[in-house]
Image (cartoon, helix red, strand yellow):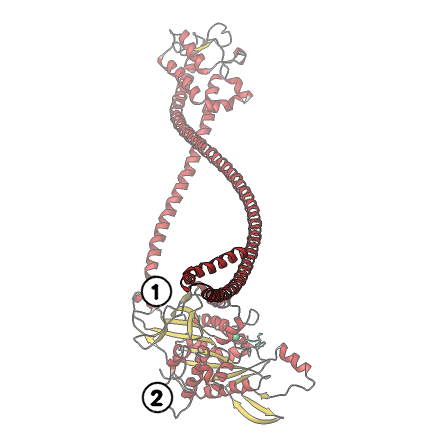
Amino acid sequence: MSVSAEESAVKVCVRVRPLIEREERATAEDSVPAPLYWKADRKSIHQLDDGVTTKSFSYDRVFSSSETTNHLYQDIAKPLVVSAVEGYNGTIFAYGQTSSGKTFTMMGSKLVPGVIPLSMEEVFQTIQNYPQKEFLLRVSYMEIYNETVTDLLVDNWKRKPLEVREALNKNIYVADLTEELVTCPAQALSWVFKGEKNRHYGKTKMNERSSRSHTIFRMILESREKSDPASGDNSEGAIIVSHLNLVDLAGSERASQTGAEGARFKEGCNINRSLFTLAQVIKKLSDESQRGFTNYRDSKLTRILQNSLGGNAKTVIICTITMAALEETLSTLQFASTAKKMKNDPHVTEVSDDGALLKRYRNEIVDLKRRLQEVSSVTHVTATEKESLSQLLQEKDQLQKEQQDRIKNLTKLLVTGSSLMPAKKIPKRRVTWGGKLVRLSGTTERDVGQSDLSFAEHFSRKRKADSSSMELLEEDEEFDSRWEIPEDYSFTTDTGSVRARGDSSDFVSPSGSGQKEADLERRLEEERGEREEAQANVASLEGRLEEERGEREEAQANVASLEGRLEEERGEREEAQANVASLEGRLEEERGEREEAQANVASLEEERGEAQARLSSLQKEWQLHLQQQVELLAREKREAWEEVERLEQRALELEVQRSAQAQEQQEQVQMLELRLADLQEQSHTEAGPDEQVCSITPSSTASLIHRACSSDSITHS
Ligand code: ADP
Ligand code: MG
């Protein structure tokens, strides 16, 4: 399918944001009115310098600050959304500096829905125009932050970086990205909100992050012609798959910063890589002269949106600006102008491989339909059964009622029979039917025939059988009186009459009258018939009674077992209560113990404190003592040293003295020697020289000296 040149062109529009409060305030505070940088009309924007146009930019459309998001949507986004339903890939980018209105335009708010919610409505609206087609729609929502792709539809704690991969058919996809099936706009939006919630969750620096991250909300549309039911469900219609991408880009001021300061980009700051690459790719694609390789792979954003950039997609770029900024607005307008020159090649993509989800779901639907049919037929059967059961139940109720009525009637009937007896013969005393009759039959053994006996039996049984209804009947005074029968009446058969014994003046069998006898016989016959009928009824009633007795017994057994269970449960409860009580007791004990232990700990703590205090005081004392000892020792040492010094001094002095004495003695010795020599000389001259020499020898001189020294040392010591 080829498309016109108009369709292949990328549509670029500019949206002017109204001044926000901050900017208005700034304008109001300035004495000089804020400079007017820009002037816009429906298709172009002009840069003004002192009121003179310096630059002009033209676009597909310029939306003034007074135009609503819906205006913008209808004009520029709606055609793209509709063609996405028709099978074309479509991408809408919002580009602009932070706080210029990208998110306002794409997401909007509750009151002013943005392009995303409006598109979701549109998709489902448009689908209604194709009744012959069936669609399968999925949505995904991802964020690219710092070159990491994450799934916004996944709970935060499960979020992990996702990989961008290329399939065999060259399609680029994000592995493990959640795709949620949607069947109405509200459902699609609920996923958008979930994504937004996940995105904002726990981010303290939310603004920082949101201005740095790109988000891609994507709807995947699969469609095909509905198969003709007559031709069977398995016709092989081609499936058309298209993507609708709604992209809220990071603030563009980062791209220009990156452009200006390449260094920052190199610093490993991946945040801007996607935006930077986007600008580069667009630049490349818009330049007719440049052919060949386009670097989509340089960033996650360009890789994921490859189709929308010069490829198989219709693309709309919404550039948001504010008149209050100059540089940023200029850079945005330049980007928009470049993008305007880019051309795409959109065409409808048909896939016929079995991988298409639609086909798989189609088969599943057929299968489910079949199962539904089965189930509904079963339901039908069940319903019929239920109906017939309720009918039966009604019949049973009816029967029961009838039986009750018949019991009443029969009772009446029986009574009617007895009411033949004269009222005045009825004694006040009350007797039971059975007992009385049996007794009566006993007393008239002779007269009692087979039928009468059975009659008596019959009544005795009837009394038993009807005991329940009788209790009721006895309350009825009028009716009650009829239950009383005269003691003296008996029924006889030999005469074929009811005959009174004893006083029988009012009701006597007129033995002579054949007419009367025949009459009585007829009546008896009637009564016999009635009796038999009654007998049959009584038999059936007895059966019922038996059943009821059985049921009652069963119910009683149930009650007994329930009581048993109740008893057991009561026991269990009591046990549990006892357990709780004992546990509480234990808890209490433990609490007590704990408190005690705590008290112990506290007292121990106190003791420890005291001991520590004592220890430290002892330590102090000991230290003091040691110090004193040390000082004492030091003093003693000093004194000892002084003593030593003194002794040394003394020794020195003694030495000096001693040497002086030695000197003196030496001198004395010398003197003595001299005197000796003198004396020897004298003796030589006075006497013979031999005698004199012998008496004074050197050894006697030495002993003399010695004596002199030792006498001296004794005196000095
Ligand atoms: P961005 O996503 O580009 O950072 P926002 O969309 O968050 O900017 O817009 C910044 C503020 O301006 C918001 O408070 C928003 O409500 C407001 N704003 C943006 N565009 C418009 C508009 N066209 N009309 C009214 N208010 C707007
Ligand atoms: Mg934003």
The response on whether ligand 2 sits within 8 Å of label 1 is: no
> Which mark identifies residue 292?
2
User: CB atoms at circles 1 and 2 under 8 Å apart?
Assistant: no
Q: Is residue 514 visible?
A: no
Nearer the observer: mark 1 or 2; the answer is: 2
Q: Please say if 690 is above or below 374.
A: below
Instruction: Give the percent coordinates (x, y) of residue 583.
Output: 48, 37
Q: Please say if 188 is above or below 18.
A: above
Kind of residue sitting beneath label 2: Gly
Judge from the rendering whether residue 88 lies leftward or rightward of residue 118; answer left or right: left
Kind of residue sitting beneath label 1: Tyr
> Which mark identifies residue 361?
1
Look at the image and tell me in which quarter the N terminus lies. bottom left
Residue drawn at x 35%, y 48% as measured from the top left:
381
> Which mark identifies residue 185?
none
Q: Nearer the viewer, residue 413 or 615?
A: 615
Instruction: Locate residue 325: give its quadrant.
Output: bottom right
Q: Residue furthest front?
A: 687
Q: Decide which of tag 1 and tag 2 comes sooner along the chain.
A: 2
Q: State the SS at label 1.
A: helix
Instruction: Give the percent coordinates (x, y) of residue 502.
Output: 48, 5
Q: Nearer the viewer, residue 710 or 702?
A: 702
Q: Nearer the viewer, residue 384 or 711?
A: 711
Instruction: Give the percent coordinates (x, y) of residue 483.
Output: 50, 17
The response on whether ligand 1 sits within 8 Å of label 2 is: no
Q: State the SS at label 2.
A: loop
